Image (cartoon, rainbow, N blue to C red):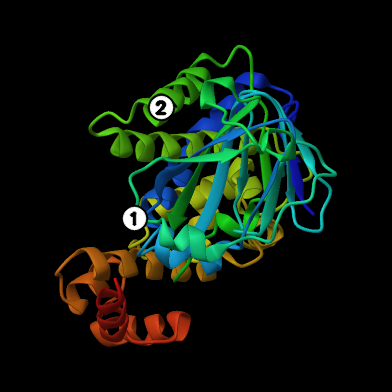
Amino acid sequence: MRTALIGAPPDLTGNPERDREVRVGMSQDTLSEVLRSVRLRGAVFYYVSGGREWAAATPAARHIAAAVMPGSEHVMEYHVVTKGEAWAAVVGEPPVRLATGDIVMFPRGDQHVMSSAPDVRPEPPDPAWMIATANDPKPIPVSMLGVDNAAGAQAPEDAQTVIVCGFLGCDLRPYNPLIATLPRLLHIPSEGDDRWGSLVIGQAVRESQQRRPGGEAVLERLSEMMFVDAVRRYLDRLPPDSTGWLAGLRDRFVGKALALLHENPAHDWTIELLSERVGLSRSALHERFVHYVDQPPMQYLGQWRMQIAAKRLLQSHDNVATIALDVGYDSEAAFSRAFKRIVGTTPSEWRRERKSGS
């Protein structure tokens, strides 16, 4: 299992100011563009109180996605420990210990277990219950009292452990470069001096408890903010020898190439022009880009153009010819051929099928 523990930041160039410039100037704008395009949205579903001994298994997201996050192709679950301690694990992998204030996310949507101790065995996950309660008022209180408290009642404020749980949905198709580069389990320990993070978690707890009007919308935004912050912190602390799309954002040359492509994807880019703007030879840029992103720059651009086009097809009434020109194609026919080659269906069919299923 690729488990990420946020630790010390890597030394990118040896110059802290330059490293910060590279990360902020290149990485975060590109990351924001991707997050906007793949329609990230969040929700808080459960407010869990646990006793001395408890365990809960969550089914793989694909089994509950349509119910808990309608319209999202991919669903991730997250948990925020607001009181006490807990353990988290992808099924079949070693568990990770969580303390108060920690956040754990499962970016790939894996079946996983949350428990009071690593040796406590949960009942099999129950997708039917999660689907049946998907439309109940949120957040849904869940009591995990354990065998020692089975005969009594326990108010959430008296629980030994309290966890706020939710889901994040996004698109995977035509192209989402972020999800595959994240670990199966992403652990974000609490940072004592992280005032912003403490405020977000504290507000999530208050909204979960008070059930005020508009609270569900507030919790949705808070969960999205937590995800973005978690990805940024993971990016900042990737080991220097990491590869993948996120590591590419942090690389001086690949990050600049990605920023240029995302800033103006409709531009008539060539590898010659891109390498000139980045400051590397064609062969050096190609080799470096493939090393990090696992595909050449022009292939990446083609896939990203399809992601932009797909979003426009779903969220606007623009005709296919207009969208084709706006994402960098000279004709509707050329765009349609490229879209079908990458996505597997024509733009009109994609729009019709997705809108009828939403």
The answer to which of 71 and 150 lies nearer the viewer is 150
Q: Mark 2 Cα within 10 Å, few/some/many (few <14, many 20+)?
A: some
- Amino acid type at mark 1: Asn
**Residue 73 visible in this rendered orientation of the protein:** no
The answer to which of 103 and 64 lies nearer the viewer is 64
Chain-order first, disc 2 or disc 1:
1
Disc tally is 2
Quadrant where the N terminus is found in the figure: bottom right
For label 2, the SS is helix
The disc at residue 135 is 1
Classify residue 187 as left or right of residue 156: right
Q: Could you tell me how far apart the alpha carbons at marks 2 and 1 are, in whole angstroms?
A: 18 Å
Circle 2 residue: 209
**Picture coordinates of residue 272 (x, y %)?**
52, 63
**Picture coordinates of residue 91 (x, y %)?**
75, 57
Classify residue 128 as left or right of residue 3: left
**Picture coordinates of residue 12 (x, y %)?**
71, 32
Q: From the viewer's perspective, is residue 232 above or below residue 131?
A: above
